[in-house]
Amino acid sequence: MNDLQITLFGAGGVFIVAVFSYNKWQEYKAKKSVERAFSTDHDDVLMREGEAPAAAPAPATAPVEPVLRQEPRFDAAPAVKTEPSFSAPPAAAVAPVPASAPVYAEPSLEAAPVVAPLAVPQQEEVSVASEQANSLVDPLIDCLLPLSLEAPVRGEKILPVLQTLRLVGNKPVHFIGLHVNGDWEPIVHGGVYTKMQGGVQLASRTTALNELEYSELVTRLRGVADEIGAEPEVPDMMEVMAEARNLHRFVTGHDAQLGVNLHTNGAPWAISTLLFALEKQGFDVRPDGRFVMPDGEGGHLFSLSTNVTLAEETTPRLTLLLDVPCVAPARDGFGAMVACARSLVGRLDATIVDDYNQALSDAALAEIAGQVQEFYQEMDAADIPAGSTRALRLFS
């Protein structure tokens, strides 16, 4: 080994020692800096021995959030399906409704007051928005689908997503939100909501919600919830199916349409002549060709059929038809229909007859009117009054 090599080795060793010493010095400085940064002159109460930490001040009682009103469900149904009839319908056709039922509440709201049912509200001041919300998501005729939000959301952010889930089969799906002001309301642009509630209608005039529809609903609901940052609470399918079948039995047992016929006493009427007479009587012609008697509020009391196709030029028979569960008793739809029939008797030279062309006497019409009143009482007892929002949704 020559002198150059010895010199290089010596220089390398000195360099290594210098780097090692410099690193140690930097570690020492960093350690002292951290100790100074976290040092304190105060004792840590959590580390004291023999002393319990001071109790935190009790929080102020939080206001109880309003709970979506709940209605009793159809927990019982008639054992035998009954067809709609006006020959003294049996009392068993009415699905009994429990006098009281549990009110839906969040787990943290055990002390929340029970809110009165929708049909007989106890609070005098109920906002229009709250009434609309309870008509859209109704615990009596809808399967409730609570959704917990990760954070408050604005209506305009979630409405486009909710619009993708409006129907399952032929059953409508609606959503409402708990506004930051404390009221449940339909979700609208500009609103800010801390909770949501969905609802799918359990039955319609034609069918009950079935397993396939419910499975589709759950799948689509989870997709919607993921997009808006929510966690859905999905009810048990078997319980939902039982409620849907019970409600549908009630609907089919009260799906009553009552007709009164007019038969010409002479030659068949010309359709052109009928149009003039019906307009004089106050009928409106709908785009689908139906004649309806308006109720003055955008709806109608009863309809009229010519019993022939549009291609026919004459008809010997007219039928006035009352959709009984869709007209409120206060409007006296049957009485208005009979009065209209009697007026047309004079205009058209006709006779009021039943479906078998037998003349209907005043006594027979009065007896039918009494049966209609009994029918209304049954619907009231089931908390689905004829002509109400609930009835119109179920019998649409």
Image: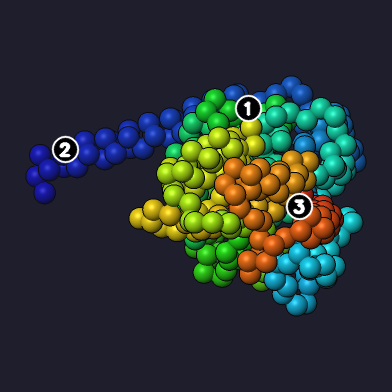
Helix, strand or loop at disc 2? helix
The location of residue 59, given as percent across then percent down, is 83, 30
Residue at image position (54%, 25%) is 190
Earlier residue among tags 1 and 3: 1
Report the residue marked by disc 3: 384
Distance between mark 1 and mark 3 Cα atoms: 69 Å
Distance between mark 2 and mark 3 Cα atoms: 106 Å
Q: Amino acid at mark 3?
A: Ile
Is residue 86 shown to the viewer in this render? yes
Residue 238, image quadrant: bottom right
Residue at image position (56%, 70%) is 211
Eyeballing the image, is 271 above or below 93?
above
Q: Which mark is residue 38?
A: 1
Q: Amino acid at mark 2?
A: Thr
Eyeballing the image, is 336 above or below 169?
above
The location of residue 273, given as percent across then percent down, is 46, 43
The location of residue 338, given as percent across then percent down, is 70, 49
Report the residue marked by disc 2: 7
Earlier residue among tags 1 and 2: 2
Residue at image position (52%, 45%) is 291
